[in-house]
């Protein structure tokens, strides 16, 4: 009997998949908001809808930051706001540790736990705020077994399309 993929691996792989939609030249980030083991929204870093994308027109850099980019975590929370989905009590899976601004936004949105794949300029004040608000933070290490299993399954299942 095949082992089922654990939730942390499943949701983090979803965040990685979303990061492939990023339009940022500098770092591709994906994020998934989850409540009660269900995805409620996802986001990736990129431009405001309808604006030029960094991959097409270059970054709009000021003081070492691209002003064009909306972070993945913010895009996920904004998707919830746009469609009236509550974020209070949700968890987030992000490919990278959230920046200070995204950390503050996630705290205000009521996110109760942050899972991340890679460290990325982990801000000391963000860590302090997370501790102050008792928000759990956990780094997820992707297990090659599940990545390989997904790839092999896709290769094996290349038969007739389902009708």
Image: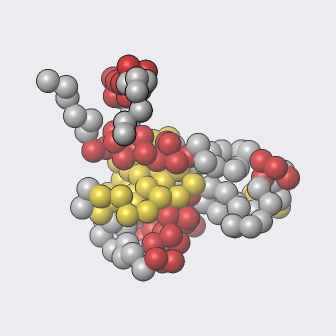
Q: Is residue 74 left or right of residue 163?
A: right
Q: Is residue 4 left or right of residue 8?
A: left
Residue farthest to the bottom, as pictured: 84
| Residue at the (57%, 54%) spot, across then down | 44
Residue farthest to the front, as pictured: 163
Q: Is residue 63 left or right of residue 98?
A: right
| Residue at the (56%, 65%) spot, across then down | 75
Rendering quarter of residue 91: bottom left
Rendering quarter of residue 60: bottom right
Residue farthest to the right, as pictured: 57
Between residue 96 and residue 72, name the one nearer to us: 72
| Residue at the (77%, 65%) spot, across then down | 51
Between residue 7 and residue 1, name the one nearer to us: 1
Colouring chosen for the image of the structure: secondary structure
Question: In the picture, which quadrant includes the N terminus?
Answer: top left
Place of residue 50 in the rendered image (x, y in percent of width and height, measured from the top left): 74, 67
Between residue 149 and residue 11, name the one nearer to us: 149
Question: In the picture, which quadrant includes the C terminus?
Answer: top left
Q: Is residue 24 above or below residue 141?
A: below
Q: Taking the image as drawn, is residue 126 in sight?
A: no
Place of residue 123 in the rendered image (x, y in percent of width and height, measured from the top left): 55, 56
Place of residue 83 in the rendered image (x, y in percent of width and height, measured from the top left): 46, 76
Between residue 112 and residue 128, name the one nearer to us: 112
| Residue at the (50%, 64%) spot, across then down | 76
């Amino acid at each position: 009997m095949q082992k089922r993929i654990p939730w942390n691996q499943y949701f983090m792989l979803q965040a990685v998949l979303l990061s492939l939609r990023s339009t940022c030249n500098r770092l591709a980030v994906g994020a998934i908001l989850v409540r009660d083991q269900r995805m409620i929204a996802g986001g990736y870093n990129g431009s405001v809808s309808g604006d030029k994308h960094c991959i097409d027109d270059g970054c709009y850099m000021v003081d070492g930051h691209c002003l064009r980019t909306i972070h993945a975590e913010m895009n996920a929370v904004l998707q919830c706001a746009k469609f009236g989905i509550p974020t209070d009590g949700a968890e987030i899976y992000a490919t990278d540790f959230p920046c200070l601004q995204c950390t503050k936004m996630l705290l205000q949105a009521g996110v109760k736990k942050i899972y991340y794949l890679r460290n990325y300029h982990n801000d000391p004040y963000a860590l302090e705020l997370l501790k102050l608000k008792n928000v759990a933070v956990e780094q997820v290490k992707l297990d090659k077994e599940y990545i390989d299993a997904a790839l092999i399954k896709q290769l094996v299942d290349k038969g007739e399309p389902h009708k």
